[in-house]
Amino acid sequence: MSDLRPSSPPRLPDFFGAPARIDAIIDKALDEKRIVGALVLVAADGAIVYHRSAGLLDRATRTAMREEAIFRLASVTKPIVTAAAMALVEEGKLKLHAPVTQWLPDFRPALLDGTRPEITIHHLLTHTSGLGYSFLEPADGPYHKLGVSDGLDQPGLPLEENLFRLKSAPLAFAPGNGWRYSLGLDVLGGILEQVQGLTLPEIVRDKVTGPLGLVDTDFFVRDRFRLAQAYADADPEPVAMTDGIEVPIYGTTACFAPSRIFNSKSYPSGGAGMVGTAGDILRFLEAIRTGGSPILRANTVETMAVDHVGTQAETQGPGWGFGYGWAVLVDPASTGTPQAPGTLQWGGAYGHNWFIDRINRLSVVALTNTAFEGMSGAFPTEIRNAVYG
């Protein structure tokens, strides 16, 4: 795997002014009180060419952000769990087009007409299953009525109970006939446990974090003193999250319970349940960028990097499709991004964004402790543009 130690500036001719540009974006976001703290890492050709921790890890104690900070990862969990699943595909233990019912016989959600179509592993990985998320529904939607957890709330909830609630809700569409961001990776986590006879945390350690040496990335916190306090968007400044806080997004709200990570009875959410450091995430992204070793074969990574759903899904806006674990940029012109075609990108609800531009040999991680500004506000777009200049 590429050496991630700080090094000299990369070979990209337009990058030499990027550190100052990125500094200015971070300073502006902090000055405007859009974020409380941030940690940004940029690697070019495998060498770290920008690294900065800024702002506060915890505003109440005036603890500065630090490079060893641990963050609640939310959906940054998804590509890691996807990689674990694809490792099992390589071993022949999991088939991409096998039905979910092969391992979860009772998981047969119905359409509104009462029919119960077959959901496959491919549907779960690509968010084409017809499942959804509570935070994407109105307050009177079926997920809310059934108490479906998004993997961010309800500390202590078992997976079996959440899957029961989830399968009781109607599918939004027949599997394969649409795209909707979903709890599919939580369902997949339950399947992986059945396949291996191990817990999801054990599987992820065995297949991904262990081989890569990601010591701080897991489904529990090893050092609470390094855990970033979570904040939510508010005026005039972000507010500290408490359990049950509802944060507005996309015309609805998402419910968070920051204490969930401390409750050992909380099910390990394959879509949102991990914590980790920016350095660990960068090491994972670099493994993917350089072909997958030591966790995956290069042809597996290529399968994951293909757009499986089409740009009509607009998974990150115009021009973006979706592969396995992340959005895939197909048409940069339609979205106005400087990123190259084939760029992989996603984020996390606690305030994160990352991307891999394989053509330009760039991996960028921007973790903040502020939702949703760090994920879907101006901040990630500004960081992206500053990187490219």
Image (cartoon, rainbow, N blue to C red):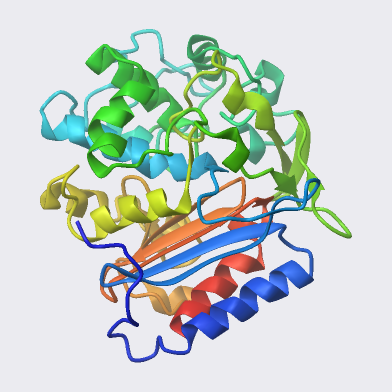
Residue 322 position in % (x across, y down): 37, 52
The residue most toward the right is 236
Q: Examine the image and state in which quarter residue 81 appears.
A: top left
Compared to residue 380, the image places residue 332 above or below, namely below
Compared to residue 312, the image places residue 183 above or below, namely above
Q: How many marks?
A: 0
Identify which residue is drawn at 31% across, 45% down.
324
Residue 227 position in % (x across, y down): 60, 40
Q: Nearer the viewer, residue 349 or 184?
A: 349
User: 29 left or right of 78?
Assistant: right
Q: Examine the image and state in which quarter residue 152 appears.
A: top right
Q: Nearer the viewer, residue 99 or 324?
A: 324
User: 381 left or right of 315?
Assistant: right
Q: Nearer the viewer, residue 80 or 139?
A: 80
For the N terminus, give its image quadrant: bottom left
Residue 282 position in % (x across, y down): 37, 56
User: 121 left or right of 146?
Assistant: left
Compared to residue 25, the image places residue 292 above or below, namely above
The answer to whether one can see residue 127 in this image is no
The answer to whether one can see residue 255 in this image is yes
Identify which residue is drawn at 26% across, 72% down.
45
Identify which residue is drawn at 52% across, 31% down.
221
Identify which residue is drawn at 38% across, 19% down.
190
Residue 124 position in % (x across, y down): 37, 33
